[in-house]
Image: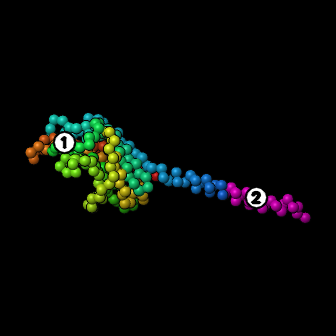
C-alpha cells in the first residue's frame, strides 16, 4: 500500500521543475535585451602628423586622424573620427574638407557603402553635412555631430543587421583653391594600409 507522502512526491517534483523553469525564463527575458542590444565596437589609432601633403606647404589639423571608433547597434552605424585640431563651425573661402569611411558588409551578399561628412565653403555656408550611399547608388543624408576634435556620423545601412563582419577604412581630404588654382591638397588614411576587420556580435 502506497503512503500519502509517496503519492505526493511526483506532484511536488513536477511543481518544483515548473517553478525553476519559470524563474529561468523570467531571468532570461529580463537580461536578453541587454545582451542583444549591446553595440559592437572597434577602434583604430592613427599616428599624428602622417598626412600626405601633395600640394602646398601646410595642412589643417582637422584632417589629421588620431583615433576612430566604429559602433554598430540595431542596424545603425555610428562613426566617431577624432582629429588633431578642433573642427571649426565654417571653413575659409576656397576650402573643402571631407572625412569618408568605406564600409564593406559581409553577410553572404557583398554590400559596400561610402559614409562621409564634408565641409565646403562654396555651398551650405561651409557647414558640416553628412551623407551615405551604397557604392553606385543614390546619395542619402544622415545625421552628423561635431564635438571639439571629434566628428560623429550616424547611418542606417541596409544589410547591417544581418552582417557577420565589416571591413572598413577612413580617408580624409583637404583642398584649398585660389582663383581656380589648387594651392593645398592633403590626405590622411586610417588604417594606413588596407582595411580594419570587425566581427559583429
* Residue located beneath label 2 in the image: 13
- The spot of residue 29 in percent (x, y) is 58, 56
Q: Is 141 part of what is drawn in magenta?
A: no
Disc 1 designates what residue? 92
**What is the x, y in percent for residue 74?**
44, 55
**Residue at 85 percent of width and 59 percent of height:** 5
Q: Residue at x 29, y 52 (%)?
A: 130
Q: Nearer the viewer, mark 2 or mark 1?
A: 1
Q: Kindly identify which numbered label has been placed on residue 106.
A: none
Magenta highlight on residue 4:
yes
Using the numbered discs, state the Cα–Cα distance from disc 2 to disc 1 in whole angstroms: 78 Å
Q: Residue at x 16, y 43 (%)?
A: 93
Residue 107 horizontal/vertical position (percent): 40, 59
Residue 139 location, quadrant:
bottom left
In this rendered view, identify the residue nearer to me: 182 or 113: 182
Residue 126 against residue 16 in the figure, above or below:
above
Amino acid at each position: 500500500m502506497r503512503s500519502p507522502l509517496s503519492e505526493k512526491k511526483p506532484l511536488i517534483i513536477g511543481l518544483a521543475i515548473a517553478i525553476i523553469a519559470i524563474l529561468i525564463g523570467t531571468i532570461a527575458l529580463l537580461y536578453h535585451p541587454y545582451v542583444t542590444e549591446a553595440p559592437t565596437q572597434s577602434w583604430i589609432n592613427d599616428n599624428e602628423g602622417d598626412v600626405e601633403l601633395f600640394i602646398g606647404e601646410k595642412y589643417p589639423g582637422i584632417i589629421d586622424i588620431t583615433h576612430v571608433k566604429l559602433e554598430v547597434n540595431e542596424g545603425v552605424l555610428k562613426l566617431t573620427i577624432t582629429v588633431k585640431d578642433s573642427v571649426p563651425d565654417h571653413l575659409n573661402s576656397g576650402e573643402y574638407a571631407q572625412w569618408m569611411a568605406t564600409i564593406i558588409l559581409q553577410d553572404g551578399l557583398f554590400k559596400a557603402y561610402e559614409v562621409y561628412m564634408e565641409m565646403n565653403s562654396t555651398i551650405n555656408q561651409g557647414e558640416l553635412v553628412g551623407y551615405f550611399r551604397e557604392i553606385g547608388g543614390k546619395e542619402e543624408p544622415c545625421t552628423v555631430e561635431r564635438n571639439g576634435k571629434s566628428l560623429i556620423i550616424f547611418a542606417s545601412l541596409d544589410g547591417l543587421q544581418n552582417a557577420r563582419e565589416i571591413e572598413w577604412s577612413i580617408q580624409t581630404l583637404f583642398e584649398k583653391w585660389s582663383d581656380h588654382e589648387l594651392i593645398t591638397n592633403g590626405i590622411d588614411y586610417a588604417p594606413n594600409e588596407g582595411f580594419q576587420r570587425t566581427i559583429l556580435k
